[in-house]
Image (tube, helix red, strand yellow):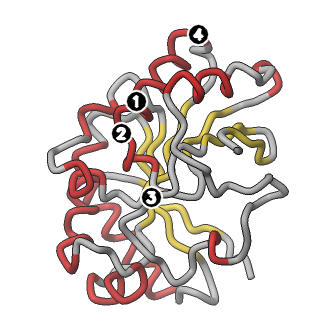
Amino acid sequence: MTITYQVKNAVYVNITNKCPCACKFCLRQNGPGVYGSDSLWLEREPALDEVVESLEKWNWPLYKEVVFCGYGEPTERLDTLLAAAAFMKEHHPEIPIRVNTNGLSDLINGKSTAALFAKKVDTLSISLNTDDADEYFVMCRPKFGRDSYSAMLKFASEAKYYVPNVVMTIVGEPVTTPEKQQRCREICSRLGVTLRIRPYEA
């Protein structure tokens, strides 16, 4: 099964297929893998030693980043994520670590989690998706209900104190209008984080 895979000049880490959302636009609805990877559907969730073994197979001087992102929400396995990140920080401290997340870690784990990322993760990329809580609920279909949007914003606002780079993302035109992008920019400004507008991929 595919635990790690390459996307451009980064190594991505696939540790779970669990996710509390069922986003209408999720790439995993389109096929078993992305960016030329083998299937990202896991036979089972890999143990920490399997994740570390897979990470050690890469020639790290050739890569610029490790990214926890696969066919699931990585904070569903928060302990494994943080332990694997700590391993990379100890053995390959020159490699930046990013986590792509829906920002619902606190709801998933039943506690405040932002502080746990300190000194282990360099960038948190959080899917904002929209400026509107009701639209978010319809678009992302989170199992935690309508409180999910506010929980995601709270997580982002707290994470900036522990993670050097906190980015919230939306998709650009034609998915979002310039007006909606501006409202998202204002949300990020209030939270003290950065907005990234991703290009639309058909």
**Viewed as shown, does residue 119 lie left or right of 161?**
right
Q: Secondary structure at mark 1?
A: helix
Task: Name the residue that disc number 3 marks.
Answer: 18
**Viewed as shown, does residue 184 lie left or right of 178?**
left
| Residue at (36% x, 89% y) in the render | 138
Q: Position of residue 169 (x, y in %)?
A: 49, 64
Q: Nearer the viewer, residue 190 or 145?
A: 145
Q: Position of residue 38 (x, y in %)?
A: 79, 53
Q: Secondary structure at mark 4?
A: helix
Q: Is residue 178 above or below residue 111?
A: below
Residues at discs 3 and 1 in contact (Cβ within 8 Å): no
Classify the position of the C terminus by image quarter: bottom right
Image disc number at residue 78: 2
Task: Name the residue that disc number 4 marks.
Answer: 91
Q: Separation of disc 2 and disc 1 at Cα?
A: 6 Å
Q: Separation of disc 2 and disc 3 at Cα?
A: 12 Å
Using the rendered view, name the quadrant where residue 12 is placed: top right
Q: Amino acid at mark 3?
A: Lys
